[in-house]
Structures are given as C-alpha cells and as structure tokens.
Image (cartoon, helix red, strand yellow):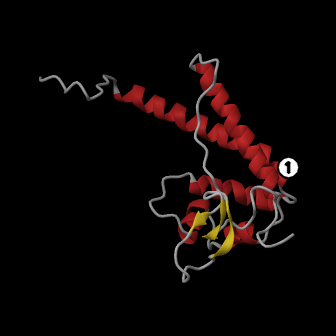
Amino acid sequence: MAQPPRDHAFVRTTGSEAAAAVRIGARLGQRKRAELLGLLRSCFCRVEPWLQAGKYVGAVSSGLPRRNGWTIAEQAGDRTPDRTQRLLNRAAWDTFAAMGVVRRFAVAGLDEAARRQGRRAGLRVGALDETGQEKKGTATAGVKRQHMGCVGGVKNGSRPCICRMCGRRPGTR
C-alpha cells in the first residue's frame, strides 16, 4: 500500500471511535446552544417568542442546503413560516440586550478556547464593520446620501435598519 502524499493528513481510527467523537461534538454543540438560549431568556417579554427563537436558531444552524422561510419552518417543526416571521418582524424582545448576551457568550467561548490552548494573551479575532455598504448608482433600493463608517464620510450607501453607534434608526434624531 502506497503512502499518502505529505500534504494529506492521515488518521487511522476505527469507525466506532469516529462516531463517538461526532456524538460528543454534537452533544457539546447542543449543550452550548441550550446554554445560550437560557441566557437569552431575559431578553424576551413572553416565553413563546423565546421558544420560537430557539427553534429558529436550531434550524438556521442545521445543515439545510437552502435557508428560506419554508425550509426553516419545516426544520423547526412548524407547518408554515408564520411563527418565525412573527418572531423576526413583530415580537417584543430586546435586540440590543440579545446582541450583548451573544457577544459576551462568544467572547467567553474564545477565552475558554485560548485557555485550553495555553495562551495567556488570548486569541486574535477579526471584526466586521456593520456600519453600511457604499453603493454606486441611483437605482439601487435603499440607497441615499448618509454617513458611511466604512468610507469615513458622507457617501451614497445603504445601512442596516438600526445604527450600531447610537441605537437609533437612520434619519431619526
């Protein structure tokens, strides 16, 4: 039997060992997701939207080949996408508190991973600038002259629905 090329990783294991590793990884993922959803409970006014958020996160993080309202509803066990759309469009929950909970949860997970690797300085992580996207042209939907953090000034562009800097909707005072 020929040896694999040097750039290929070769792992010798039995099927039961690999299956056990997958089960442990899946169980850990489920436990972490449940922990995060428990932390998010205080961000919701009612229990029903919180439960739907848990089903939504489970569906979005699954291996769905296409993610749209119907496939997410099917994965979540709903007959129609109405419940998820109600959660995303009309349910009462504190989005900024939820963002803070998720941010703290992610940072704690990164700190834990750094400690497991024996790093005292922590891990380096890239950050995304969500302040908007510069657009060229006049026919693109949602484009107007506004301050764009990605270009450092006032340009034509589209922005997310809520300003990340001050928490207000664009165009409001």
Q: Quadrant of the C terminus?
A: bottom right
Answer with left or right where residue 62 lies relative to residue 104: left
Answer with left or right where residue 61 lies relative to residue 16: right
Q: Nearer the viewer, residue 130 or 149?
A: 149
Residue 69, position as x, y percentages in the image:
58, 70
Q: Secondary structure at mark 1?
A: helix
Residue projecting furthest to the left: 1
Residue 27, position as x, y percentages in the image:
58, 36
How many dots with numbers?
1
Residue 80, position as x, y percentages in the image:
62, 74
Seen at 30% across and 22% down, the residue is 12
Q: Which residue is mark 1?
A: 42
106 versus 135 height, above or below: above
Task: Mark yes or no: residue 35 visible.
Answer: no
Seen at 25% across and 28% down, the residue is 7
Q: Quadrant of residue 32?
A: top right
10 versus 61 height, above or below: above
